[in-house]
Amino acid sequence: MDKNLIPKYKVDKFNFSPEEKEIIEELRENLIDLAISENMSSFDSDLILKDIIRFLENRLVNNPNLNYNNSQNSFNLNNEDSTFSDSNFGENNFQNNLNPKYLVRLASNMLEELIGYGEMSSLINDDNLEEIMVIGVGKPVFVYHRQFGMMETDLYFDSEDKITNIIDSIARETNRRIDQQSPILDARLPNGSRVNATIPPLSADGPTITIRKFKKDPLTIIDLIKYNTLNTEIASFLWLCVDGLGVKPANVIISGGTSSGKTTLLNALSIFINPKERIITIEDTLELQIPHRHLLRMEARSVNIENEGEVTIEDLVKNSLRQRPDRIIVGEVRGKEAITLFTALNTGHSGFGTLHANNSRETITRLTNAPMSVPKIMISSIDFIIMEKRIYKSDGISFRRITEIAEVTGVEEGTIQLSKLFSWNSETDEFENLTIASKTLTEIANLRGVSLNDLNMEWANRKRVLDFLVKNNISSIKDLSKILEEYYVNPSNVLQHID
């Protein structure tokens, strides 16, 4: 990386020789014929990789007009005639001094070019990237790096066909449709990444691809504390309220702008849900990675090629009420499903959701107006609104902070009342506890039959546990789940251990 205004990102690319490109096109035609003849919507990549290796080996071993330059790692093709071979991989000891490691690498890269993501594969596999952005033909691909922010790569697509091939591979892999009648694609890769693609005439400069990536190992609540997204005081308060001591689990809306970390925070907070609960998650595109054993993941479905078969978020929320959920989690609340969700919250179910807004008051405004139109009387079923923001520094690097936690305290004269419990001080980069009294803590204490002093002591004990985990860098989901489950069973034993 250099020190330009927009840092540069060097892509690990595999450069095919002209002869190898001819072989790729020949293989592509064979695959298309196979897909048409067998009516296939997806391919077995392992079988195809073996076929490509056999194909390359056969071309080298059996075709005297095909030479391999071992020093340059490339083929020289002089004869177009070729057929698939049944010869075993490795037979003839790779005659003509063929480098076996290179053959496997070449075949793997050809496979990526044919049914994968081509030159974008190394970007998709880089866990340090949050976003990959293809903006058209002849323009650099941009990426958003978790450490360095927006970066410009050295990857360019010189034709629409190359971008379209990647889009078609994604559409085929996810059984989605993109064409002139449906020129927008929303899909999810097998690794969980979210994809949006467009084709002309919607995108004037050629096909575009935007991929939102998620870490292979999702950030946990301890990771977020170490990043100062929140502190242990706030985290332990939320732990106490999300768990609710088994009598009143809190209902929470996480609100913020695009890419502010709402989904990451929701994932992290979900570890505080009691292991005995049954959770149902509902999303447009699966993004949540809830670390819980008793979990049902539901995904909405768009219309098919016949313009039929649509299943909306609202349909799934309604259906979830028949599945005996303890907790309903909606990945993003933005439409008519809001009324169904709030009806569920008002009838005894617990729930989480995320929403796009800039502050807690705007969150209420969005919920109570079209297209969500939740009646104000129902809003009181929310316990907390957590605001999270992405803050940009002058060098383009960003960080995320919980800027506010507001408690919904009721409705007076048609106005929903909010009480700010915590806020972030931008000057000191510290969190301020504004909690004088909490309606939720009072309700938990009354239902559990304990005093507020007892509840505050429990809050302090849970903070001790989180402080210990942060200090000892215990952040894996497996370790956190084990310790938290032990705390639910025998809290005194855990506290004695950390002391």
Image (cartoon, helix red, strand yellow):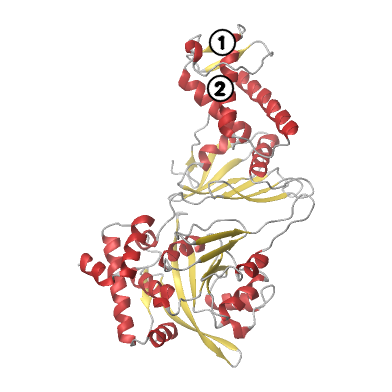
Do tag 2 and tag 1 residues touch (Cβ < 8 Å)? no
How packed mark 1 is, by other alpha carbons closer than 10 Å (few <14, some 14-19, many 20 or more), is some
Residue 330 to residue 369: above or below = above
Quarter of the figure with residue 156: top right
Residue 53: which disc? 2
Residue kind at label 1, given as amino acid type: Val
| x 68%, y 29%: residue | 31
**Numbered tag placed on residue 456 in the rendering:** none
Q: Locate residue 472: give its quadrant.
A: bottom left
Identify the residue shown where x is 47% and y is 76%: 250
> Residues under labels 2 and 1: Cα distance?
12 Å
Q: Taking the image as drawn, is residue 392 in sight?
A: no
Q: Number of numbered discs present?
A: 2
In x, y percent, where is residue 302?
70, 56
- Residue extending furthest toward the top: 64
Give 275 or 231, whichever is nearer the viewer: 275
Image quadrant holding the C terminus, namely: bottom left
The picture places residue 466, in percent across and down from the top left corner, at 31, 66
Position of 461 with respect to 426 (left or right) is left
Nearest the eye: 2 or 332: 332
SS assignment at label 2: helix
Report x, y in % for residue 81: 69, 13
Indicate which disc residue 61 carries: 1
Q: Is residue 31 above or below residue 460?
A: above
**Mark 2 is on which residue type?**
Ile
Q: Nearer the viewer, residue 399 or 296?
A: 296
**Residue drawn at the location 34% of the way across and 65% of the way down:** 484
